[in-house]
Amino acid sequence: MTSPDLTHLLAVARGDATADLLLRNARLVNVFSGEIYPADVAVAGSRIAGVGDGYDAVDVVDLDGRFLAPGFIDAHVHVESGMVPPSEFARAVVPRGVTTVVTDPHEIANVHGLAGIRFMIEDAKGAPLTMFVNASSCVPATHMGTAGATLGADDLATLLDEPDVLGLAEVMNFPGVVFGDPHVLAKLRAFADRVIDGHCPGLTGKHLSAYVSAGISSDHECTTVEEAREKLRLGMTVFLREATNARNLHSLLPLVSAATERRLCFCTDDRQPSDLLEQGSVDHPIRLAIAAGVPPVTAIRMATLNTAEHFRLRDRGAIAPGRRADLVALDDLDRLWPSRVYVGGRLEAQDGVLLRARRSGTSTGTLGNSVRVDWERVSLRVPAAAGRIRVIGVVPDQIVTRHEVLVPTVEDGLVVADPERDLLKMAVIERHGHGSGVGLGFVTGIGLARGAIASTVAHDHHNIVVIGADDRSMLTAARAVADGGGGQAAAAGDRVLALLPLPIAGLMSDLPIEEVRDRMTALIGAAASLGSRLHDPFMAMAFLALEVIPSLKLTDRGLVDVERFDFVPLFAS
Amino acid sequence: MTSPDLTHLLAVARGDATADLLLRNARLVNVFSGEIYPADVAVAGSRIAGVGDGYDAVDVVDLDGRFLAPGFIDAHVHVESGMVPPSEFARAVVPRGVTTVVTDPHEIANVHGLAGIRFMIEDAKGAPLTMFVNASSCVPATHMGTAGATLGADDLATLLDEPDVLGLAEVMNFPGVVFGDPHVLAKLRAFADRVIDGHCPGLTGKHLSAYVSAGISSDHECTTVEEAREKLRLGMTVFLREATNARNLHSLLPLVSAATERRLCFCTDDRQPSDLLEQGSVDHPIRLAIAAGVPPVTAIRMATLNTAEHFRLRDRGAIAPGRRADLVALDDLDRLWPSRVYVGGRLEAQDGVLLRARRSGTSTGTLGNSVRVDWERVSLRVPAAAGRIRVIGVVPDQIVTRHEVLVPTVEDGLVVADPERDLLKMAVIERHGHGSGVGLGFVTGIGLARGAIASTVAHDHHNIVVIGADDRSMLTAARAVADGGGGQAAAAGDRVLALLPLPIAGLMSDLPIEEVRDRMTALIGAAASLGSRLHDPFMAMAFLALEVIPSLKLTDRGLVDVERFDFVPLFAS
């Protein structure tokens, strides 16, 4: 619905003109006063006109005592982790009551730069949710790997005129902030009048004071109450995160109190299709919080008004005249099941299903194929040398790794994978058209007995990462994902066992999210058939190239000792 | 102090550079977390750099366990009611811990228009407090009286570029909003991206929904919990007012709870010099609230963080790195006595006294003499006619009046004052140079036995208002205030008994505020010597010309029946 003219809105509000929609017999969840009470809500176009009795409307809906809450807001999400573009992401989250998300498109930005960010903004247009964008502050994460783009302060500043761009996304380079790196400060200055979100796991004391003094006003990386309390005391808004691979909610819930809750929000950060479809989006932490004893109005306020206020969104986050009619009718406050979801005054979802037809044929638009590898230059051979080798040790369900030093298995003068020792070869193949450099290493903890798995989803540079028991399988898997313009694959020998094409930046599919989930299940099944012992080896693999998370990682440029923040040779000597 | 460069601020925050100021051994009042705990606060220039241990500074002050709170913020004040310009107003309020005020300069705007508003902004520059301005939305209040200026949407929009202008001040013309008056909507549209403050006593139901739907986000006119709760439920921020002539705090305190307090602030609206000096400014309602049982951190938060957030002031309202070092060291949380007040990192007041010397010789600058009366055209004679007359009935300590109909006292064919019946003549003499029209009427309840009192402070048009027992005394008093370029006077016959010159717009003195108070005391004493039974007849008189407050009022254009919102003749039939 379009935004009504103020004259008409006033006429509807005072009862002199007929409303477009009247939601009768609601139990209003009032996030301003902390109350729940019976009320009717009148809507004109996309806006709430009045709250109270005696309105007439073209469309009168009797909510029969259902709870009516403001649409939920996800404070921080990388939509790309849902492996579908925003328009399809909306199909999964809007029926859950999520009507607004604040996204940092830094996965696609690492592949396509500003064009990737603009692709996300364009794709979200016309979708039945509002996707606000924070400009990705750390592209690339470091220069120890090769990304598809580099975004400086001047590049990011070109986004300031976009109406859906709010501010600067998670400033992960916290040492750069604390120690005043001029490139980082230039970005902060460019966004000084906007919201600047943080990302500073474990930062404390004076360094935290410095980080906050720079104007960074949130953090979603807290893992303990003590850490969160220190940040909250300095005025940061703390986003309680419940991601697929980082579930911090229960650890942080003891912080929620009447005195603190106004600076607490919920976010999902990264959620995979299966979690989105089966557990939900930001509705999931609300539900968990209520189940854990947080008063329902408080939990809902944390996902609505608090988030809106943090992001200076004065047109939403509550049910009040003049605000957007983003409204969720809930059968109860336990299951938090939305029977109806209105977005901008329009009924968009009912009983868990989006009402509008799926947008067909999302394409990569002007982005084109993002996978550019010169296979002639790709070799996976690792010549043997004297001594032991550094091996990446996978820790189940964590993105940190162990830095192990093991005796290599050598055949014909080459270091090779040795599945019997759970020693697999890993390669990171540059795929952004910058020379197809290959980083080579070894990994333990994935557990393939044979074959290989490959993916173009490999944080944050998103090169091709491949792990396998033999080079032939590895090349088969790697070429399979490359041939699809990106994707994930499992292969054995010359045979591709399972494939999920991700033609959009090598990160997202153009299939329905349910089919993406099913193909991911098939991929994990294929990996299991090859001997993997992890519940999701693709997820584990996606973080083995992320050189900002300890301890030992592999990029296209080589092995990185994260503690030393520098490259190290394969052979430990 | 100047704002530090970010690079230097970071260096101080992380401990690599020496702070300018360190406040040690504070008990920090943390308005984010609701806690009070020991801490040190390091300051660089005008900003807080760090909160925590181990900082060094050029100037180290041991607070010896004193409470350290953020500087207090007055959410809504007409500085002119203090009868001194902003620079002198600061002398009274800064030692009280008030470091920021949000003012609506609509008194001076009714006299001098935009030039008056800019005079206030200029005068506040260099004063030891921040005075933010909201553009006066209702100048003049109505067209039933003659003001010195008319401010349309285009005029107000010229203020948008002023860095100290926040938004639009109290939109008192609530019928104009509700019924969509195009001139009112033009002002709302001009300030649509800014804070728009409200003023809607008693507005309820659909009309309140309409008012809120227009984007008006606060109200300071609530007198009951029920009224305030309805407004709060619709998302308005409610300012609890404790003015000289409207004391609403205790009526509204039952609304304060953990669930509601974040949308509650304090304001003073109008405080006269004696109240400012003896009770205080916005520190007074904080103190009263604490005495009434509101938790101290909550009461302080209502006057700091809440107000800052309402006005989108992200640089103040709390003690945190990067925010302004507006800090109040308090001996206790009962008397709330500030032993030290820092404004922008600089010690400005100590033990109730402003440290810097009073600025000498505030002049009217380019404003000039605001009183322009053509005395040749002024006649106070009221020819008699048949029937009874309408008489304004003063209600002690209220600004509403009774509409009485009494038999006139007639002498020589003229209606005259009759002090024995407490029937005094009242005149409102246009003084803005628009023809010196005179409105004439009669008033009961002031109680002068003889003589007259006059004032150029007469809301909202601020013409000369004069009340007396005889025309000669009235003209003496009126000419006395006019001759001083504005003021207040008491006279008997040809003799001026007491005079307070108010050369700045006829509203403000250039004397020290203590002397203004003393002269007001003398004026009230003089009025008492003439027989006045009111504790402040000048205050009462100042509202008898305000044609938007029921029931019967007198402007320079005649008697106004406020219920009918139209002029009525003196003779009732």
Image (tube, coloured by chain):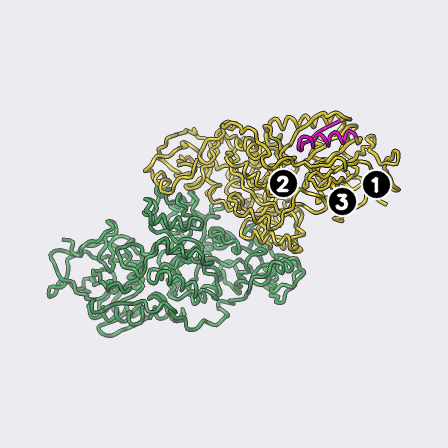
Chain colours: A green, B yellow
Q: Which class describes the residues within 10 Å of circle 2: few (<14), some (14-19), or many (20+)?
A: many
A92, B200: nearer the viewer: B200
Quarter in which the N terminus of chain B is drawn = top left
Chain of the residue under label 1: B
In percent of width and height, residue B56 lies at 35, 33
Q: Is residue A519 above or below residue A539?
A: below
A413, B146: nearer the viewer: B146
What is the span of residues highlighted in magenta in the rendered image? B472-491
* Residue carrying label 3: B560
* Residue carrying label 2: B112
Q: Is residue A437 above or below residue B168?
A: below
Picture disc at residue B389? 1
Q: Is residue B456 left or right of residue B344?
A: right
Q: Which class describes the residues within 10 Å of circle 1: few (<14), some (14-19), or many (20+)?
A: many
Please tell me in which quadrant of the rendered image residue B88 appears: top right
What distance separates the C-alpha of mark 3 from that of mark 2?
A: 24 Å
